[in-house]
Image (cartoon, rainbow, N blue to C red):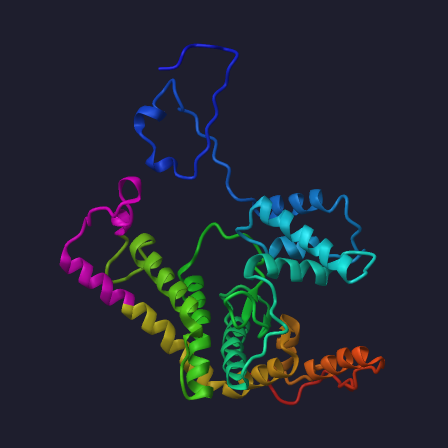
Amino acid sequence: GFDTNDQVIVIAATNRADILDQALTRPGRFDRQVVVPLPDLKGRLQILNVHVKKIKMAPDANLERLARGTPMFSGADLAAIINEAALAATMANKDYVETADLEEARDKVRWGRAKKSKVIDEQDRKITAYHEAGHAYIQSVIKDADPLHKVSIIPRGPFGGATFALPEKDRTHYTRKYCMAFMQICFAGRIAEEFFCDDISSGAQADIRQATEMARQMILTWGMSDKLGPISYDSDAEGFYGFPGEKVYSEKTAENIDIELRNIIDQAYRDTAALIEKNKDKLEKIALALLKYETLDGQEVKSILEGGELSKPTIAELLAVEQAKINGDSPKPQHQDAPNQKQGENN
């Protein structure tokens, strides 16, 4: 054991307290555990406020919105966002860090640097646009999902595009309806490819993995299967020191679990396909807007679904401005403002 010394406090840290030897954690040794979870919404906002004290922020910079959009971010992640935003503002010769700088920094920390200069084949760009439009449409119309924040077809890291949600709160519980909505959003990209591109691509890899993991959690951990009942089957997920544990259920039960996984995934897929097929025209409007503008926020997607027109420069116009700057000219984007009015009803 340890020598008694009232002047010394021994502290240890680990991310895997569950695999520590009981001899180490018994009374008189490391018997007191202080759990330090990731910060919640209030904590993230407080951390952000600490890191911006030495930075000039624009009066309308929205830290609360940034805190909402960073669930599961650590304090170090949040510090990195502020540093990246400050660097971006400095490189752009801005006097203040604006909300746009914070948004870009968050996306960079989460997904990687935007590859705006990457040359993309037009067919790949089309596939990405319809894929992300599928996510954005379902995210916008399903009431049990988190609100849509923005959607983009600008490549980041290994991803060709991304659709971002903006949770209204940190979740401590996941309802069955929320889980089903999550899976529908995951499958929407693949289904949109099927309907509009006459083929499917590997771009849905991460979506399929997330949907499958959600279905497994629902059935194995949370007891959300009507057929299997409120029973936990996840005790075999991991054994001592991370090695696979022993199954605690029969082969017949394992077969039923596989069937239920297939059933719940098929249900989410069918419901999503039916919704998209019924509203293909609306999804296509989002895809065409993505090809035209590359990035849309949630309000712009809502406007498109309500039949409105967007009044901002297209990506082609912005590129023309950049080229003109290189050539020594200074033309302005030649877009025309259009009234934000409905052209038809949104059923």
Nearer-the-camera pick, 86 or 325: 325
Q: Can residue 168 be seen in this view?
A: yes
In x, y percent, where is residue 315?
68, 80
Tell me the residue at 59%/85% (across/down): 288
Nearer-the-camera pick, 56 or 145: 56
Tell me the residue at 45%/74% (across/down): 203
Q: Give the range drawn in magenta.
A: 232-261
Nearer-the-camera pick, 271 or 58: 58
Seen in the image, is 279 located left or right of residue 220?
A: right
Seen in the image, is 300 located left or right of residue 190?
A: right
In x, y percent, where is residue 67?
63, 52
Tell me the residue at 52%/78% (across/down): 128
In x, y percent, where is residue 83?
68, 51
Seen in the image, is 233 located left or right of residue 212?
A: left
Seen in the image, is 265 located left or right of residue 277?
A: left
In which quadrant is the C terminus drawn?
bottom right
